[in-house]
Amino acid sequence: MTSLQLGLIAGGVALVVGVLIYNWLQERRIRRRITATFARKNPPDERAPAGAARVEPTLAGDSDDRGMAAPRRAVEEGPGAGARDGAGGPADAATDFVPPVDFAPQALTPAARSGPVVAAPPESPAAAAPLEAVPWPQDAEKSAQPDPDIECVVRVQPASPVAAGALAAGLHARVGKPLRWFGRNGPATPWQPLKADTTGTFSELAACLLLADRTGAATRPVIDRFIRIVGEITATLPGAFSAPDSQAEVARAEALDRFCANLDVQIGLTVLKAGAATIPGTRLRGVAEAAGFRLADSGRFEWVHEDTGMVFYTLQNYRSEPFTADNLRLTSTPGAVFILDVPRVADPVRVFDQMKLAAKRLTLTLDAALVDDNRRPLNDVSLAAIRQQVEATASALKEARLDPGSPRALALFSG
């Protein structure tokens, strides 16, 4: 064996060891961040201003929207971008919702018939503008529990049991963050999600506002508006409700938002033609659909699990233009990007393995190259490093009781 061969072998071993050490350090950093950041009861004094630009972690230096790890909150998402069942994993894994923390006893404020008890401060013109109603993520109702860890929960005690129809104004309220209502008939009975057509009467109600999602943390005007709406509804029952401290809820929302940003990872694998060559849109569509993708209204191809109907990963244009039936028929593109949204997919490591194989097959079929955001080829060592990052992120999410693909994760990593 020559000295050159020995040198190459030594270099390869050093590279593999370096990758393993790097990923160990990354996982250790994430675990430390969980401990330091997710302190709901004692959020840091220095908080990022509400609505500030989000800076997300990446897997490889300066990455744009075609990178190996795109900033998740900066990436536009289409309907059904997540999945709750892993590739071949148990379908009920996502329903393993953390048992709720029961409500701390609070003095109830009686609500008069004439109007709400809680008087929110005057809203700014921007806050007073109509806000879009946001639905709770699909399948979250299976948890059937308020979640005080990630929601602002306001408990309502009607003077007498009421039907869900009495909450019509609240059930259709437009607050700016996902809003859920629950009812039950006593502390020993389970909570039941309420809709306009829910039957029965309820002696205890809970209004739950999500504190953070991909659009950012719930702001003071949003929380004040939510509390005021609950107060107005309580006054019509009549009943009593316990209003939380708005500023404390804002602090919780900002801390939760920062924490989620640290684990907000999307993985991108780019299939790219060499030089100035391009892929005809009709060719790309045919190959993608043959591989099991379907073109969605979001402008991406989606790979959907046959049994669950959930999206595992997507294929988007390398260029900024979304895919449509028309532009695929008339134009071409230099490449396409496979995207895995780690927090929104159950068993993301297994789904990454599936996506990696699909990307390799597409690369061979289209006579293209599998590259990173800097157009550097991705070999097996690089892909193994990315897989380790996916595994580290999934482990960190689980430690934080945000199981990937679960209703809780779908709520926080949506929008």
Image (cartoon, rainbow, N blue to C red):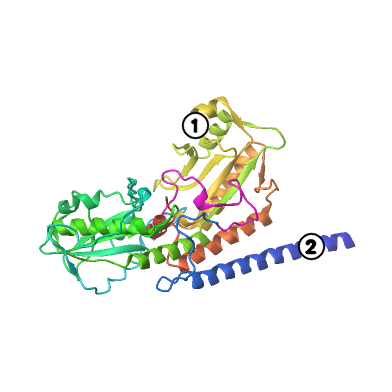
Identify residue for label 1: 324
- Image point 41% across, 70% down: which residue? 40
Q: Which residue is mark 2?
A: 11
Which label sits in the foreground, 2 or 1?
A: 1
* Three-letter code, disc 2: Gly
Residue 142: tell me if it is visible.
no
Q: Residue furthest top?
A: 330
Q: Position of residue 108 (x, y in %)?
A: 19, 70
Judging depth in this view, the residue of 41 and 116 nearest the camera is 116
Q: Amino acid at mark 1?
A: Thr
Query: Can residue 325 be spotted in the picture?
Result: yes
* Vertical comparison of 176 with 320: above or below: below
Q: Which residues are magenta?
A: 56-84
- Image position of 365 with respect to 60: above or below: above
Residue 146 position by quadrant: bottom left
Residue 262 in the image: state x and y as whole percent. 52, 62
Q: CA distance from mark 2 to mark 1?
A: 46 Å
The secondary structure type at the circle numbered 1 is loop
Q: How many residues crowd around disc 2 within 10 Å: few (fewer than 14), some, or many (20 or more)?
A: few
Vertical position of residue 319 compared to residue 24: above or below = above
Q: Are marks 2 and 1 in contact (CB under 8 Å)?
A: no
Q: 255 or 109: which is nearer to us? A: 109
Tell me what residue is drawn at x 64 percent, y 55 percent: 60
Q: Residue at x 50, y 73 (%)?
A: 35
At mark 2, the secondary structure is helix
**Residue 116 lies in the magenta-colored region:** no
- Magenta part mainly helix, strand or loop? loop
Left or right: residue 293 compared with residue 98: right
